[in-house]
Image (spheres, grey):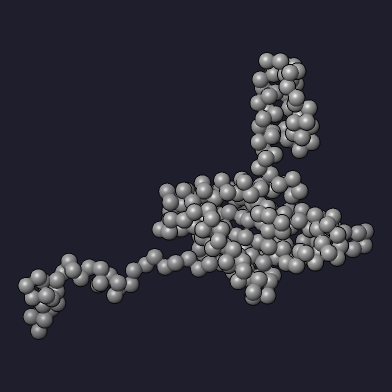
Amino acid sequence: MDLGELRLNTAHALVAESGHAPLPPPQDNPAAYLQALIDGLCELSLKDPLTGLHNRRYLDAVMDSEIDRVARTGEAALLLVLDIDHFKHVNDTHGHLVGDQVLQAVARAVRSCMRPMDTVARYGGEEFAIILPACQFSFGNKVAERVRQAVQGARIQIAPSQTLSVTASIGGAYAIQWIRSTAALWTDRADAQLYKAKQAGRNCLCIEEPPDSTVSADEKNLLLAPLYTSPERGESPLKSASGSAH
C-alpha cells in the first residue's frame, strides 16, 4: 500500500489536532496507520467540536440502542433535555465568544454530574441531552436537580474581573419496557416537559411521571369475571357459593 498516492494531509492534521491518541508512523505499518486515521475521523464525526461532548448523530444511535435495552432488560432509562435560559441575551450582551465559553462551562458542569455509563450530548444550539440507563423512577428528579444546581453554580470567567453565571431549564421522560417507543417519540416527550419547565419560570425541572402499570381490584374483576361466570345462571359460582352459605 502506497500512502503517497492518497491525499491524507488534511485528515492527518484534523486527527492530530483533536487530542486523539498519536497516530502510528505511516512508514512502519501503512495499514495500521490508515486504520488509526479512519478511527480518528469516525470519532471526530461523532463529537461536537466546541464542547467535546457527543453530537446529535451519536445521541440518536445511543437512544435507539437504549430503547432496545429497556425492552430486553426491563430497566427504565431517563432522557433529560436541558436548555440554557436566556442564552440569546448572553450572546447579544457579551458576544458570541462569551457564548461559546458559556456552552463549554455548561458542558463541563453537566458532565461532572454523570456516571461513566451515561451519555451527554450537545443536542443543538444551547440545548443538551442526557441519557441515563438503568435509572429508577425515584432517582430522576434528584439527578435532574443535581444537574440544575451544577449549571447554576458554574462561574464563567469572561474578563479578568468579571464572571458570568447562567441557569438552565430541564425536562425529562422515561423509556419504559411496557411502552414501546422510538427515539423521536421519546425526545418529543422530554421536549414537552422542557416546555413546561420554561412555562413555570425557567431554572427548574419537570420530569414526566411514569405511567402506573398496576391493575386495580376493579380492573382485575372486570378482567377475570368471564372466567368465573356460570353460563346457565349468568352469575359467578363463587358468588353463588357465598350466598348459599348464608
Give the answer, above or below, for where 242 lies relative to 168: below
Q: What residue is at 76 percent from the left and 48 percent from the top?
A: 50
Residue 231 quadrant? bottom left
Q: What residue is at 39 percent from the left and 65 percent from the top?
A: 213
Image quarter where the C terminus lies is: bottom left
Q: What residue is at 60 percent from the left and 49 percent from the top?
A: 59
Residue 126 visible, this orientation:
yes
Position of 98 compared to 108: left or right? Answer: right
Give the answer, above or below, for where 20 lies relative to 243: above
Residue 195 quadrant? bottom right
Q: What residue is at 78 percent from the left and 64 percent from the top?
A: 88
Position of 150 compared to 159: left or right? Answer: left
Image quarter where the N terminus lies is: top right
Q: Position of residue 206 (x, y in %)?
A: 59, 69
Given residues 113 and 225, the one toward you in this image is 225
Give the answer, above or below, for where 96 lies relative to 193: above
Label tally: 0
Residue 105 visible, this orientation:
no
Q: Position of residue 69 (x, y in %)?
A: 47, 48
Q: Position of residue 11 (x, y in %)?
A: 75, 31
Q: Position of residue 218 (x, y in %)?
A: 29, 75
Position of 196 compared to 18: left or right? Answer: left
Given residues 9 and 190, the one toward you in this image is 9
Given residues 41 and 156, the one toward you in this image is 41
